[in-house]
Image (cartoon, helix red, strand yellow):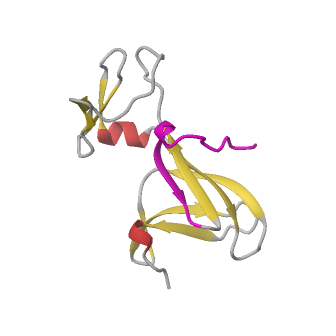
Amino acid sequence: MAFRVPQLLEECLYFTNRGYISAWVYRKLCPKCKKATMGKPVVKGKVKSRAKEYVCPQCNYTEDKATHEDSVHLEAVYTCPHCGKKGESTAPYARATYKKILSYVVSCQHCGAKMPLTKKLKEVD
C-alpha cells in the first residue's frame, strides 16, 4: 500500500521529516457532517493551539482532544537504519516510552526494528 504524502501542512495534525523518516498524521473528517476536516478552534483569526477540543468549521461539532487523537494514526515512510530497506508503516498517534524517552515508535516492516520519533529531537542511546 502506498501512502499519500501530504502536499500542505494544513492537512496534517502532525508532520516531521527527520532525514531517514518522514511521518505525518492527517486531519480527521468530521464524523457528523462529513464535509470538512476537524481542527483546533479559531477565535478572531487565530488558532487556539492549547485548546482541549477539536472543532468542525462547518457544523461546529466538537470532540475532546483525547477521543480525537485516539481515533487517528501516524503514517511513516522511511529507510530503515538497521536493514537499509525502504518501507512504510503506521503507528498509534500516542507517545510511548522508548529507552526512557517519550516518542512515537514506528516499526520496520522488514526487520521489525523500532525507530523512535522523539520529542524535541532528543538523542536515543
Q: How many marks?
A: 0
With respect to residue 97, does 29 lie above or below? above
Q: Please tell me which residue is depicted at 43% across the width and 14% down the height of the picture.
A: 33
Tell me which corner region of the image, top left, top right, bottom left or bottom right, holds residue 69.
top left
Dividing the picture into quarters, in which one does residue 39 lie? top left
Where residue 36 appears, x then y in whole percent? 45, 21
Q: Which residues are magenta?
A: 1-18
| Front-most of residues 121 and 82 | 121
The residue positioned 52% from the left and 57% from the top of the image is 16
Residue 43 covered by magenta stretch = no
Q: Residue furthest bottom?
A: 125
Q: Is residue 54 left or right of residue 33?
A: left
Residue 66 in picture, x, y percent from top left:
32, 42
Residue 35 or residue 112, whichever sits in front: 35
Which quadrant is home to the N terminus?
A: top right
Q: Is 105 displayed left or right of 70 in the figure?
A: right
Residue 70, image x, y percentages: 41, 42
Furthest toward the front, the residue is 45
**For the view shown, which residue lies furthest in the left direction?**
44
**Residue 9: within the magenta?**
yes
Q: Nearer the viewer, residue 9 or 119?
A: 9
